[in-house]
Structures are given as C-alpha cells and as structure tokens.
Amino acid sequence: MTYLPFGADGIIVRVEADIRRGIPGFDITGLAEGAVREARERVRAAFRNSGLKFPEDRVLINLAPAGLRKDGAALDLPIAVSVMAAAGLAPAAGNLLIMGELELSGRVRPVRGVLAAIASGLAEGIGDFIVPAENAREAEILAGADCLAEYRAGCRANFAAVGNLSDAVAALFARAETGAFPAPGVPLAPQSAGGDETSPAEGYPAGDFADVKGQGNYKRALEIAAAGGHNALVFGPPGAGKTMLARRLPSIMAPLSGHESVEVTRLYSLAGPHVTGKSGFIDQLITCPPLRSPHHSASAEGILGGGRSPRPGEISLAHFGVLFLDEAPEFKSAVLQALREPLEDRVISIVRAERPLQLPAEFQLLMAANTCPCGRLGLRVDYEDAQHGGQGCFCSQEEIHRYWRKFGGALLDRIEIRVPVLPPKISEIGGQRPPGEERSADIAKRVLAAVEVQRRRFKETGARRNALLSVGKLELCCPMSDQTKSAFHKAITRQGLSGRAYHGILRVARTIADLAGRETIETEHIMEAIHHRRFGEDPWDIMSVT
C-alpha cells in the first residue's frame, strides 16, 4: 500500500501487481496521471541499475481505488516493490505502507506527506512503513513520543528508512525472517542532522517586543490577541512599527499542545518542501504557533488552498497560528473577502468533481495597513517641516475611501481589535531603552497563564480560545455584575455596534479578565475591550490619535 496527499487528509492506495505470459509490457491502471505513468520507465531503469532483473513478461499494476485520480512520484517505490513481490524477487509486502520516488540509479528520493501517511496508516491498523532515508526524522515523529499515542490506534509504528531500491529489498527480507525491520525506528541510511523540537526562541528570530520602543497600546492589543486568539487590525502611517511588532507576535504566544503540534506538522508535511525549513522536509515536531505572511500579490487559491492536486493554502498553514497580511489593502478585494467564511466557520470547503474536501482554518488574522494610498495620512507635520517642503497626505478624500473600502464592512466586523498607531517621535527613538519596556518573555508568561485558564475552561467543549467561544456559551462563560452589564449595553447602544460586535467585545473582555486573573468580567475589562474596538471603520480615525 501507499499514500497520496489530497487536501488536508490524503488517501491510502492499494498497489496490486499481476505478471502473466505474453508480449513483454508494463501497464498501469487506476486513473494514473502523467508522473505515475512515467513510473514505468523509472522502475525499469532502477531495477537494472540496482542489479535486479525486470520480469520479461506482461506486467500489470492496478492502483485501487481505481475511481480516484493518482498523481505524483511517491508511487515509484511501492510499484517497484509490488513487481518484485509478484516476480518472486522479494517477500510479499502484506500490511505495509511504502512511499518513495525512484531515480534511474535506484536511489530513493524524499517525498511530501510522510508524517500524514503514517498517521493515516496507523488509523487504518497499518504498523509497518518503508520511507525514504531523507524522510526518516519525519517518520520518527509518530514512531516515538508517548504523548502521541492517540494517533496510533492501538499499534506502534515500525519503519525502515531506505536510501535505494536494494535497501528496500533487504528490509523486506529482514521483515519476513524476523517479523520486524532490522532496527525498528532506526533508518538503514545515515540520519540527517536536526533538533528534537522547535521552541519559540529558535523558531522566531524576528526579535523581542522590547526592541520596539513605545507603542504601548499596540503591544497591549497584541498581548490580548495572543491570549485569546482574536483577530486584529493595525493601521497608521509608515514607520510606526506596525510590521516590526506584528512579526514579533509569535514570541509571546503560548506553545502548541501535543495534539496541536501534530496537526500543524501534518499540514506542513502535506504542503511539501517549499514551505519547510532549510532541510527541505519536516525533520522535527513543530511546537511554535506558525506565522504565515504571504505577499500581497498572492492569489485566492494560494491563500485558501486547492489546485489540481489540492494542497493546503496559507490559511491552513496558519492553523493554530497567525495569518499576517502586511499592506492588507494592497491585496485583491476577492482575496480579502474570501477570508470571511473561514473566519466564521474555521474550515475551508472546496468542491471538486472527484470529491469535496475540507481544509482546517482555525487561525487568527492580523492585518497591517497604511491609512491611505500615499501613506501620509496622520503623519505629524510641524511648522519647521512645512517650511522645508514637508507635506501631509497627497490623496483626495475619494481616493482614501476607495482604498479603505477594499476591506468591506463584513470583514471589518469580524475584526475584534483595531489599533491606530503613529510613528514615534525622534526623541523617543534615540537613547536607552526605557525602564518600563517589557521583554517578550515577560508578556509570554501572562499569555500562557491566560491560555491555561482557557484550556481548563474549554476542556470538554473543544473551543480552545475565547475567540472561538460560541454565542450559546457566552452568558455562562462571561459572568458580569448588573452594573457592568448596564455600562456595556449603554456603550454598545451609543456606538451603534452590530450583534457580532457585541459578542466580539464580550469575548475580548473575557480574555482581558483572564489576563488579570479574574473570573468575573468587570467594567474596566469591558471598557478596554470597547476601546480596542472603537477605531478602524474609517481611516480618518487616525487623526484622533495623539
């Protein structure tokens, strides 16, 4: 058997081989696409260059289920093993899942989706696996670690990591003789170097919160967003530190739990080497919340996922993490509006002719934007600057509103936290770090404490964070005094906010109370939540910031 990535799951494919008398030939059935059909020539050459004799008969390979299209080079090695077993050159594979691409020399190349394949195999009761040597560390993630027992379905993963076709044959004979691979969990080929787990410090070298001077309101907003999983928008002129602080957000976020780590690592395994680190393939468990920051030229398909052979997009790669859209108004309107359903449903449904699929989308959105096309709306321009030619905004009012309208009211209504920021003064930039500047580690302790409170609170419901708290649970999880409730309702009425805004403010207030270590939401928590919500509907809000 083998595994083909498809969306966020994939399919297990049974590879059947039949050799019969007739004119020599090599046929593959089961909706095999280009790369799979070309496996015929790669397998022949790999046999010859590995010192093995390819059968001089009629060879037929069937890939079941035959009704689903098969594509990719990961079927090379399982096809070769099936031919060897049918020809009597190797023991029958039996309950074994194999993945690997073959070079003409017989060398086995790495493939994507190995961790996902092992997870799916274990769920189906498959305990033995043959994987490429370069995917060995990826395979070890589910082969070890007792905290991942939930993925094993009662069996333990036993795998052999092979560097070439001859290694695969040796592993099959050893398994047939002893009932196990030569050394379970130890690859036959040398193991690539790499660490055991990623940590927040190693995974995010972007810097520390203390490196950015000032912007206390923005830092506080990011702390609340990190603790509760809330969406946020920061806007203001260039040079205010919007991007600098946004890229430091993961440094204060709580590490992923064991289950979350495996889910994120699975998605990166399925996405392929173009999204992983220097090694090209997954070599360790991802324990830091991911931060994805696509360029504003990204297509809707690149953000949402899909393609001819569907793969996770940027939203799914930000699962349990952050999707950061820098220069957000520069993104296509269709891309921005496509975010609305995933933010609401926390899943992306893609319909294909073969079958529909769903991609996970439990992420928090962070957007940074200038206030106008030229970026100067809100800049401080004093008399001396004006004397030397300094000017404010160059845009007309219509240009400013057209620029801001790309967000749309429906998307902005889903953003619980909006922060206007101005560039710091020169006097604030120079000099030593002020004594009040907190480091990321200090903020992260408060965030982690608040997250642990939420994990205990939602242990049975599966909500994870306050931002995912359902409307039906709000009243139960957000107790308030009559005085606080009255102040809340008056503020909502005065600002004319929607029902979604009402619930969003309540969720943010719940997070603020958790950060303060309070079970009951107080008036000060509600007022701070409203403060973080009151801006952002109009770019001219930046003019009210002092």
Image (cartoon, rainbow, N blue to C red):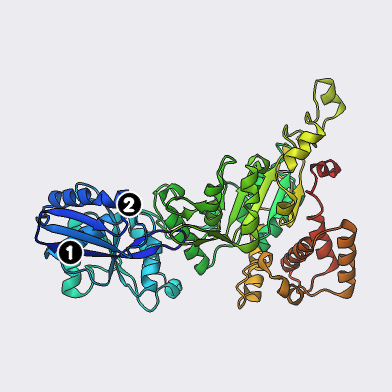
Q: Earlier in the sequence, mark 2 or mark 1?
A: 1
Q: Nearer the viewer, residue 302 or 416?
A: 302
Rendered image quadrant of residue 489? bottom right
Q: Residues within 10 Å of mark 2 (few under 14, many from 20)?
A: some
According to the picture, the residue beneath numbered tag 1 turns out to be 18
Residue 121 vs 205, above or below: the answer is below
Q: Secondary structure at mark 2?
A: loop
According to the picture, the residue beneath numbered tag 2 turns out to be 33
Q: Quadrant of the N terminus?
A: bottom left
Residue 526 coordinates in the image, percent (x, y) = 82, 64
Rendered image quadrant of residue 310? bottom left
Q: Answer with left or right where residue 404 lies relative to residue 251.
A: right
Residue 272 vs 157, above or below: the answer is above
Q: Answer with left or right where residue 86 lies relative to residue 305.
A: left
Q: Answer with left or right where residue 208 lies relative to residue 58.
A: right
Q: Residues within 10 Å of mark 1 (few under 14, many from 20)?
A: some
